[in-house]
Amino acid sequence: MSRLGTESAFEVLVRARELEARGKEIIHLEIGEPDFPTPSNIVEAAVRALHEGLTHYGPSAGLPQLRQAVAEYTAQYLGAPVDPSEVVITPGGKPIMFFVILALVEHGDEVLYPNPGFPIYESMINFVGGHAVPYGLHEDRDFDVDVEEIIDKITDRTRLLIVNTPQNPTGGVMSGDGLKALAAKLAGREIPVLSDEIYHRLIYEGEHSSLARFPSLREWTIILNGFSKTYAMTGWRMGWGVMRPDLARQVAQLMTNSNSCTASFAQMAGVEALRGDQGSVERMREEFRRRRRVIVEGLNRIPGFGCRQPHGAFYAFPNIKQTKWSSGALADALLNEAGVASLSGTAFGEWGEGYLRFSFANSVENIQKALERIGDWAKKRL
Ligand SMILES: Cc1ncc(COP(=O)(O)O)c(C=O)c1O
């Protein structure tokens, strides 16, 4: 257990709630979840399924209807056929990370992962006894990956490569050229790639692409995706993986050994989410785009803060090096003294030092209020 890490967004949320219980008003820019309600067509589908009696165990790999819907949905964005036997439904996308790392990584195996990056990658690699090998995401590259750096770090012990686009916490998006170059260099190496595409619909410039689109990598890529961010369904715990059928069977067996299955009525809502009207997804993205402008412009007006425009997801990741504060101390001070909850860049790995992460999954009004508070705090304390 001493090797297992955590996701500090949840811990900061607890600290923020404690401050609120003591009467302090906090603006929450720490947690990464859409503040919109789940679209009503999806809620109605779940209610219908409940009335129809979908309240029992289902197959560990997921209901056939949802596996089929996910296969069709994925085939559409990959531009290549996907068979339902490649799909496993899990309670959120996170278990795909957990199960795939558990299934593939042996003691001493090396796993390449982005740093700064989603903290559970490093946590799980360490937990199973793997050797976590970070690759950097650099501000001067707009937080896109450096293909050469990844390739240079591959050894004969490399068992898995993790990529995440659009990226948490930087908002970086892997460019089409970058993906092509990476695919070309990975071809023939037989290294599985866990491609975390949970923010795939939240792109503000250009279009999402996946390493799985490249025929040479198709069978080596494990796609992690889900409903949480796209359909504002974080609390439903609904996600999926798309992978080779032999690995899908093993992941399903891990489901049998842990959760048994994902909630049956929730899966029927998932079918509606994927096949029903997509208007709400577009509306949410346009609102995020509006908020992105407000937060990036606002942060850039605060002395010591410099923020690039994120191209995807809903996070601003300003550089705070000029404040001369460490990221952890600054995040703490903003929470305790300014009443604004954010995350230290180091919550995403040690190479996140010098940055903070602000989620803009909050109203424009709250974002403006937070910016005013940070600005006032900076005048007094910087
Ligand atoms: C990069 C990334 N991957 C996966 C997840 C997991 O999402 P969920 O388990 O809610 O589907 C998150 C959630 O914050 C994330 O940021």
Image (spheres, helix red, strand yellow):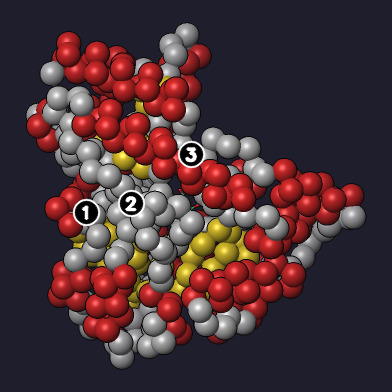
Which label number is shown at residue 311? 2
Q: Residue furthest top?
A: 23
Q: Position of residue 298 (x, y in %)?
A: 28, 28
Task: Tell me how far mark 3 sits from mark 1, CA to CA.
Answer: 22 Å
Q: Residue furthest bottom?
A: 188
Q: Is residue 25 left or right of residue 82?
A: left
Classed neighbour count for the residue bearing mark 3: other residues with Cα under 10 Å, few (<14), some (14–19), many (≥20): few
Question: Where, quadrant-wise, is the C terminus in this rendering?
Answer: top left
Q: Are marks 3 and 1 in contact (CB under 8 Å)?
A: no
Which label number is shown at residue 142? 1
- Name the residue: 46% across, 59% down: 200
Q: Is residue 3 left or right of residue 319?
A: right
Give the secondary structure at mark 1.
loop
Residue indicated by mark 3: 287
Query: Looking at the picture, which amino acid does disc 3 mark?
Result: Glu
**Which of marks 1 and 3 precedes in the sequence?**
1
Task: Locate residue 309: give its quadrant.
Answer: top left
- Name the residue: 63% across, 74% down: 72
Q: Position of residue 74 (x, y in %)?
A: 55, 71
- Name the residue: 46% across, 73% down: 222
Query: Looking at the picture, which amino acid does disc 2 mark?
Result: His
Give the secondary structure at mark 2.
loop
Viewer can see residue 126: no
Q: Are marks 2 and 1 in contact (CB under 8 Å)?
A: yes
Query: Looking at the picture, which amino acid does disc 1 mark?
Result: Asp
